[in-house]
Amino acid sequence: MTMEKSVNQADKQLGSKKKISPLSFMGSLFAAWFGVQTKANRERDFEQGKFHHFIIGGIIFAILFVLFVVGIVKMVMHFAVA
């Protein structure tokens, strides 16, 4: 009977795993991108976050960053020529 209780408690702990909030997710993504992620936040992300969310978020952030840099360069080149 004790073994059954411990198995049920382990199942409850796995089922009640907290999820990372969207704001925390974005904060972690930005912090990791710039290399200033704290150890506590990194551990929280690995425990509560889903791997594929971070991969997709990183790809989206990388694309947005490249588009931003291209836009800035085009703007500077436009004003440099004029």
Image (spheres, rainbow, N blue to C red):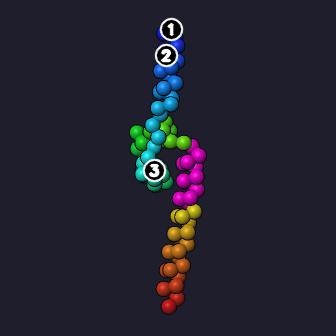
Q: Amino acid at mark 1?
A: Met
Percent from the top left, x then y, of residue 19?
47, 40
Q: Is 80 placed above or below 70 here?
A: below
Secondary structure state at the residue bearing disc 2: helix
Name the chief secondary structure element in magenta: helix
Residue 74: name its quadrant: bottom right
Residue 40: name its quadrant: top left
The answer to whether the residues at label 2 and label 1 have Cβ atoms under 8 Å apart is no
Q: Which residue is mark 3?
A: 22
Q: Which residue is mark 2?
A: 6
**Residue 35 in view of the camera:** no
The magenta region covers: 51-62
Q: Amino acid at mark 2?
A: Ser
Disc 2 and disc 1: Cα gap in Å? 9 Å
Pair 2/1: label in front: 1
Pair 3/1: label in front: 1
Q: Is 75 placed above or below 59 here?
A: below
N-term-proximal mark, 3 vs 2: 2
What label sits on residue 56 in the rendered view?
none
Dot 2: few (<14), some (14–19), or many (≥20) neighbours within 10 Å? Answer: few
What label sits on residue 1 in the rendered view?
1
The answer to whether the residues at label 3 and label 2 have Cβ atoms under 8 Å apart is no
Residue at 58% x, 52% y: name it: 56
Percent from the top left, x then y, of residue 18?
45, 37
Q: Is residue 71 magenta?
A: no
Percent from the top left, x then y, of residue 66?
56, 66
Q: Is 17 placed above or below 36 here?
A: above
Disc 3 and disc 2: Cα gap in Å? 33 Å
**Residue 54 in view of the camera:** yes
Disc 3 and disc 1: Cα gap in Å? 40 Å
Q: Is residue 61 magenta?
A: yes
